[in-house]
Structure formats: structure tokens, C-alpha cells
Image (spheres, rainbow, N blue to C red):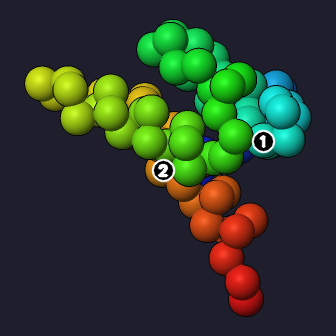
Amino acid sequence: MEKEIDIENLVNQLDFKSNSFNNINGLMLTNREILVLDKYKINYKNCKSLKEIIFEVEEILNDMDIVDEELDFIAMSISERDYYQNTNK
């Protein structure tokens, strides 16, 4: 017997706000990314490119004894966005 899925309940549980984009000095960052960058005191407001933010994040990741999955996820997300925005196709 298959379990019935409550679509309305699933949609109500989705967090659209954390994935909303903000334009920070011409750089597009999600609310979630900003929250994590703030948590690690990464001064993204002074960065001129996504690559600069990625560099700052990687510096912190390299100094850690263990991998912080949240910070690593943010680095990958920003890196992917940078690739698609700045690669000639």
C-alpha cells in the first residue's frame, strides 16, 4: 500500500526565503549564503567578485580541522554561480 503524499503540506514546508537573492554591490547572494558568511565573519560586502568571496571561504575551510558541511556547501554554491555567470559559452 502506497503512502498518500500531502502536496499542500510539502509546499508549505518549503523555505523560499533562504534561497531568495540579494544584490550586494553587484554580487548576487542568497539569504542563506549571507547568513553563513556572516556567521563566519566573512566580509563579503568588501569583495568585488564572487571569486573573492570563494577565496575568503576557502581560507577559513583550510584552517579548519574538520570540514564544515554548511560552509563547504556555500562555497560550492557560490563557485557554481560564478562559473555560470562568468564563463563564455
Query: Which residue is at 20% across, 26% downward?
Result: 63
Dot 2 or dot 1: first in sequence order is 1
Query: Which residue is at 74% across, 65% downward?
Result: 85
- The kind of residue tagged 1 is Leu
Whole-percent x and y of residue 55? 44, 42
Q: Quadrant of residue 26?
A: top right
- In the image, which disc is placed on residue 5? none
- The kind of residue tagged 2 is Met
Q: SS at mark 1?
A: strand
Crowd class of label 1 (few under 14; some 14 to 19; many from 20; radius 10 Å):
some
> In the picture provided, is 30 more to the left or to the right than 42?
right
Q: Are marks 2 and 1 in contact (CB under 8 Å)?
A: no
Query: Which residue is at 67% across, 46% downward?
Result: 49
Q: SS at mark 2?
A: helix
Q: Is residue 1 above or below residue 38?
A: below
> Can residue 62 be seen by looking at this rendering?
yes
Query: Which residue is at 67% across, 25% downward?
Result: 46
Q: Which residue is mark 2?
A: 76
> Can residue 73 be seen by looking at this rendering?
no
Kindly report the distance in space between the C-alpha atoms of the residues bearing marks 2 and 1. 16 Å
Q: Which residue is mark 1?
A: 27
Q: Quadrant of residue 20?
A: top right
In the displayed image of the protein, which residue is found farthest to the left?
65
> In the picture provided, is 78 more to the left or to the right than 56?
right
Q: Is residue 39 above or below residue 64?
A: above
Quadrant where the C terminus lies? bottom right
